[in-house]
Amino acid sequence: MPTVPESSHAASAAALTQSPHIVAVGASAGGLEALEKLFDGLTSDSGATFVVIQHLSPDHKSMMANLLSRHTTMPVVMVEQDMPIEGNRVYLIPPGSIMHMGEGKLTLTPKNPRTLTLPIDVFFKSVAQHYGERAVGVVLSGTGSDGTRGASAINDAGGFLIAQEPEDAKFDGMPRSIIATGLVDAILPVEQIGARLLAHITNQPIVQAAVALEAPAAPAQSLSPEAAFNGILRLLLQLGGIDFQEYKTGTVMRRIERRMNVRQVISLDSYLELLGNDRSEVLILRREMLIPVTSFFRDAEAFEILGRQIIEPLVARKQGGDTIRVWAAAVSTGEEAYSLAMMFLETFDALKRWPALKIFATDVEQQNVEFAGAGTYPESIAAEVSPQQLERFFVKRGNSFVVKNELRQCIVFARHNMLSDPPFTRMDLV
């Protein structure tokens, strides 16, 4: 089995020690009461940095600093440009601003009133980029779906996600939207979120649980860390149906440690025992390994090259009665497949050729296939597709955008394992 160099573990451990947890808290309508209860449940000496992102109009005079100061002994400050961050402090987004997390500081840009900008998504993504597994996202009461895309970024980086229980929120749109991703680690009434945050922030033994897979087992343990790790991989294969043996050990360990943290288990041996007694946890861990992080036109440069060098010549060779057959594998929650379909349909119009289009979009995870087939996405996708594409291919329903039939009928979604299932044949593009 491949092992992670000792120096890498040492560097990783040092980075964890030096870097604080950044707790990004998103709230909108009904969020004041939830924020007050959240900080009532937090101590002032956790070492974490707390950043609150709300939806505030530019002309709003915020009293939030004064209001929250009544519920915490931590200093509560309104952010200014390039403000350095410190632990055991609460930072508030100013009205009319979009805020980003930089290396140890907070930066601000004016919010454009003419475009849809989702400040919680933006900040969550920047925290994930700079703080990785030390990023924590908390979504409280609010309407809409702000925070959903950013939560995926935090999860992808190995961070931790908490949502307020929808029944506990004055407005449940934002909590329900993030919960629907299946990525949330804890769903709690707001009074219990503070305690869960502190448990996560201070639970250092779990972070160190598997630093050395070849370390000898403690006398009280029946398995060494390496044997327990191999046992976990065997369970994932036997019960989850996927062999992760050739995945990077460091990546697999980070995902296992994340689930250990969520379940508050401090040894690989104990987690293996938990998996043996709880098949649902095996399936959750498998999904954690197959983390569905994607977006529309995620790699813009790659899509541009694909369109110019592959799709345009392919369409130019086809006649009206022909069918273009495409296999898009590992499509996660469908954004890539719909992006391809949009490019083909737009190319048909540009070249004035209209062959039939059939995209076979597959993924190994059934939950992803079902999500993609439903074609319902948060309003934050407005930042990923052009206004023209949004108008032509989607319809707004509540706080979501739903794929129109013109786009949906081009795609067949199906569960498929490329390592064990027969391939699709007679494809023009794979």
Image (spheres, rainbow, N blue to C red):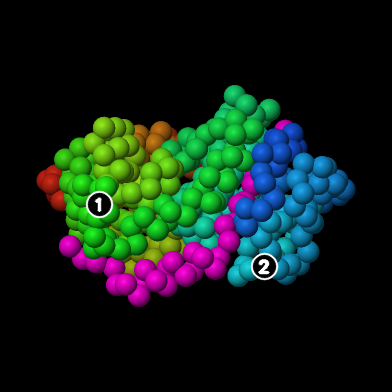
The magenta stretch is 1-30
The amino acid type found where label 2 is placed reads Lys
Q: Which mark is residue 219?
A: 1
Query: What residue sits 78% from the left and 53% below the top?
Result: 76
How far is disc 1 from disc 2 in space, using C-alphas? 45 Å
Query: What residue sits 42% from the left and 42% below the top?
Result: 264
| In this picture, residue 300 sits left or right of residue 275 | right
The mark lying in front, picked from 1 and 2, is: 1
Q: Split into 4 quadrants, where in the image is the N terminus?
A: bottom left
| In this picture, residue 292 sits left or right of residue 278 | right
| Residue 93 picture location, percent across and down | 74, 54
Q: Is 188 drawn above or below residue 82 in the view shown?
A: above
Q: Which mark is residue 105?
A: 2
Whether residue 260 is in magenta: the answer is no
Q: Split into 4 quadrants, where in the image is the C terminus?
A: bottom left
| Residue 43 picture location, percent across and down | 67, 46
Q: Secondary structure at mark 2?
A: strand
- Determine the image quadrant of residue 205: bottom left
Farthest bottom residue?
7
Query: What residue sits 25% from the left and 48% below the top?
Result: 221
